[in-house]
Image (cartoon, rainbow, N blue to C red):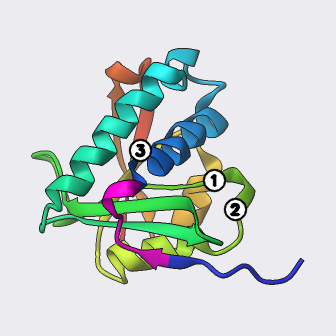
Amino acid sequence: MGAVTVIIREPLPGDADELAAVHVNGWRDTYAHLLPERFYDEAAYRRRVDMWTRIIGERNPASTVRVAETDGIIVGFGMAGPALGEDAVRDLELYSIYVATAHHGGGAAQALLDAVLGAAPAQLWVVADNARAQAFYRRNGFQPDGATKIEEHLENLADIRMVR
């Protein structure tokens, strides 16, 4: 198979459905062993469509949102902005990067990270049980700083903070 071209662009109003599908499927593929089906069902998908419609419509100038597209299909997204929480240790935070499983290792995640953060100092929270994501972030200069939190609304998932 030849190289796949990944285009990074701003999300458009018509992208909410595809973004919601990447988001919900990403959760299913990554966290099915940790979270119940209600996080991936049709109601979850509808909530994500609403969320993405709002994010795209707001175009918050403090945040950066980009999508990764291959052959006209959205295969991932990334979002960053001002660090959240009183305990923030950086001004900038990576809120999320999701890439469809079929496109893991194809460069989309790296292109998204570069587009939303560049080389800036930043922080992020990642599920403690997500070794693949942690390895990706380590390759990009992030290291755990010892901070943890429990996501009560997510069945008590444990997160660790990584910084660079």
Please say whether residue 37 is visible from this viewpoint. Answer: yes
Q: Are discs 2 and 3 less than 8 Å apart at CB?
A: no
Residue under the image location 15 percent in, 48 percent down: 87
Q: In the rendered view, tell whether residue 139 sits above or below residue 15.
A: below
Of residue 7 and residue 123, the one placed in the foreground of this image is: 7
In the picture of the structure, the residue carrying the numbered disc 3 is: 160
Within 10 Å of disc 1 (Cα), the crowding (few <14, some 14-19, many 20+) is many
Q: Earlier in the sequence, mark 1 or mark 3?
A: 1
Residue under the image location 35 percent in, 73 percent down: 116
In the picture of the structure, the residue carrying the numbered disc 1 is: 100
How far is the residue under mark 2 from the one under mark 1? 5 Å
Between label 1 and label 3, give the one nearer the viewer. Answer: 1
Tell whether 163 sits left or right of 55.
Answer: right
Residue 103's tag is 2
The answer to whether residue 120 is magenta is: no
Residue 24 in the image, given as x and y percentages of width and height: 52, 37
The answer to whether residue 9 is magenta is: yes
Residue 21 in the image, given as x and y percentages of width and height: 53, 42
Of residue 157 and residue 54, the one placed in the foreground of this image is: 54
The magenta segment: 8-14
Residue under the image location 64 percent in, 27 percent down: 32
The local secondary structure at tag 2 comes to helix
Q: In the rendered view, tell whether residue 86 sits above or below residue 105.
A: above
User: Where does the N terminus fall, quadrant-wise?
Assistant: bottom right
Q: Earlier in the sequence, mark 2 or mark 3?
A: 2
The local secondary structure at tag 1 comes to loop
Amino acid found under the numbered disc labelled 2: His
